Image (cartoon, rainbow, N blue to C red):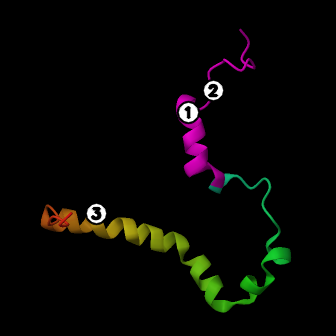
Amino acid sequence: MTRTAPTARPRGFGALSGPWHAHVGWRFNSVGQAERRRYAADLLKDRGMRRIDAAEKPLILVSLAIPFLLVRAFGELPPSGL
């Protein structure tokens, strides 16, 4: 059996390559992306949208860091009531 056969095992993450790409991998793939200046010119001109775009990664980091720091500070979070 060759590596190009449909029954061959996928490369990379193995069985996780499909779900990885579906959930996260597409963010790192620039092939097929539209031109920003052509299709989102109004958003590029909007100062508020540029600020939100620039703050995306820091906001993600903060939103992940706050629960981590709360658990480290207080040991355990109270039950959510669900």
Kindly identify the amino acid type of the residue bearing the numbered disc 2: Pro
Under mark 3, the amino acid is Phe
Q: Do labels 1 and 2 touch, CB within 8 Å?
A: yes
Residue pointed to by mark 2: 10
Q: Is residue 34 left or right of residue 53?
A: right
The relative height of residue 31 versus residue 55 in the rendered view (above or below) is above
Assess whether mark 2 and mark 3 are in contact (beta carbons under 8 angstroms).
Answer: no
Around disc 3, counting alpha carbons within 10 Å, would you say few (fewer than 14), some (14 to 19), or many (20 or more)?
Answer: few
Q: Position of residue 27 (x, y in %)?
A: 63, 56
Residue type for callout 1: Phe
Earlier-in-chain disc, 3 versus 1: 1
Work out how far the residue at label 3 is from the one at label 2, CA to CA, in angstroms. 35 Å
Comes first in the chain, label 3 or label 2: 2
Look at the picture and state if 67 lies above or below 9. below
Q: Position of residue 13 (x, y in %)?
A: 56, 33
Query: Which residue corresponds to the image point at 80% horizontal and 55% vertical from the top-left?
Result: 32
Q: Residue at x 61, y 45 (%)?
A: 21
Q: Is residue 1 above or below residue 4?
A: above
Q: Which residue is mark 1?
A: 13
> What range is drawn magenta here?
1-26
Residue 25 location (% of width, % of height): 61, 49
- What label sits on residue 68 in the rendered view? 3
The residue sitting at 70% across, 52% down in the picture is 29
> How many residues crowd mark 2 within 10 Å: few (<14), some (14–19), many (20+)?
some
